[in-house]
Image: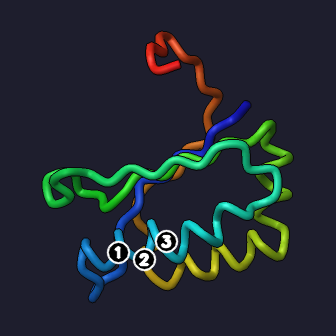
Amino acid sequence: MIKMVDLLVRKDGTSHEEFVDYWLGEHSELAKDLPGLRKYVTSVPNDPEKAGYDGLLELYFDSTADMKAAFDSDVGRRVQEDAAEFVNMDEGPTLVVDETVQLDELD
């Protein structure tokens, strides 16, 4: 399983609260339909000004090929176009990683 991690920065002219409302509402409903998506996690910093980012996104897929297919799909294109409306796509790093869980007491 692979995970894509994005540190998100809102577009200029959008408040942090507006960003979060849209991201966790309308945008999340679109993103949940990405083909092959296995897990979708959003995290909002308690103090975004100190954090330097407005949100942390984690998307899980079985493989990088599945991730690529998801974003190449019609749904994937709509998700990316929608994100570009409220996310500064040139800011914040994106990582694609293999996750190794060292401890998980939540399960």
Look at the numbered disc 1 and give the secondary structure of its residue: helix
Which residue in the protein does label 2 denote?
A: 22
Near-viewer residue (65 or 74): 74
Q: Nearer the viewer, mark 3 or mark 1?
A: 1
Contact, mark 2 vs mark 3 (Cβ under 8 Å): no
Position of 92 with respect to 107 (left or right) is: left
Q: Residues within 10 Å of mark 3 (few under 14, many from 20)?
A: some
Contact, mark 1 vs mark 2 (Cβ under 8 Å): yes
Near-viewer residue (94 or 43): 43
Q: Amino acid at mark 2?
A: Tyr
The numbered mark at residue 71 is: none
Residue drawn at (83%, 76%), measured in percent from left and top?
Answer: 74
Residue 107 spot, x, y in % from top left = 53, 19
Near-viewer residue (44 or 94): 44
Q: Which is more N-terminal, label 3 or label 2?
A: 2
Q: Residues within 10 Å of mark 2 (few under 14, many from 20)?
A: few
Residue drawn at (52%, 77%), measured in percent from left and top?
Answer: 26
Quadrant where the N terminus sits is top right
Residue 22 spot, x, y in % from top left = 42, 77
Residue lying farthest to the front in this orientation: 107
